[in-house]
Amino acid sequence: MIELGVNIDHVATVREARKTHEPDPVWAAVEAHLGGADGITVHLREDRRHIQDHDVRRLRELTHIKLNLEMAATDEMVGIACQVRPEMAMLVPEGRHEITTEGGLDVAGQEARLREVVARLRDAGIVTSVFIDAELPQVEAAARIGVRVCEIHTGPYAHAFFNQGRDRESPAVVAELNKIRSAGAAIRAAGMRFNAGHALNYFNVQPVAALPGIRELHIGHAIVSRALFVGMREAVAEMKRLLREAQCL
């Protein structure tokens, strides 16, 4: 059964807009869990634009749900991960100028460095994942550095879906979905777990959720946005229903 990891970064974005104490990401994580989330994802960025160090510590201490820590492959972040010990650490590219993550990690271009990072995280008992574009060389490089999970960047698919008027049968959308499908097959053939995420929402998620062998989707902005109107628990429950429906089609 496909799992849903809920990214709560933008709960912290609202809090940081006023530099106050609310809304509390830990409370959001509990509500997401009650709504059916299988895990919580947070991205501790170098510039600390939303999630803060104390959020990660409190999530580890106060919640009873799988924690996925998105992080750049820096010595600082590896040290934090080894102290906090999330169930999974996902290595992502990061730039201060970007609004959100704009592409997959170039694993093939920095294998030696990433192999060292993965080894350190593995020695701390942390499952490692990489966020990559749907490209075979990146999948192959991920297998070589020893990660157990690959998360495919679904942004190009999501943008095509929107630009084509939400027509899931348009050639552009089908082409992007096929890239994800092919990457997923290569990930599974290499013995890794096939996850996906980025820019998925209530309209475009089902074709991705229906792909063969997909294990987990990580979704944040769409769920937090919907939660403003229906509450976090219901927003998560609605997304979880869509994932289950997709796998029954």
Image (spheres, rainbow, N blue to C red):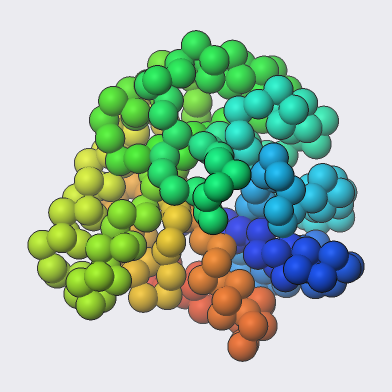
Residue 215 visible to the viewer = no
Identify which residue, 46 or 244, lies in the foreground: 46
Relative to 216, say whether 121 is above or below: above
Q: Residue furthest front?
A: 97
Residue at 71% from the left image edge and 53% from the top image edge: 49
Q: Position of residue 148 (x, y in %)?
A: 50, 29
Residue at 44% from the left image edge and 53% from the top image edge: 197
Relative to 241, say whether 157 is above or below: above
Q: Is residue 139 left or right of residue 55?
A: left
Image label count: 0
Residue 129 visible to the viewer = yes
Residue at 54% from the left image edge and 56% from the top image edge: 99
Q: Position of residue 69 (x, y in %)?
A: 66, 43
Q: Position of residue 216 (x, y in %)?
A: 47, 51
Q: Position of residue 159 (x, y in %)?
A: 31, 63
Q: Residue furthest left?
A: 171
Relative to 11, say whether 211 is above or below: above
Q: Is residue 72 left or right of residue 85?
A: left
Q: Is the N terminus in the top left, top right, bottom left or bottom right quadrant?
A: bottom left
Residue at 28% from the left image edge and 25% from the top image edge: 137
Which picture quadrant has residue 189?
top left
Q: Is the C terminus in the top left, top right, bottom left or bottom right quadrant?
A: bottom left
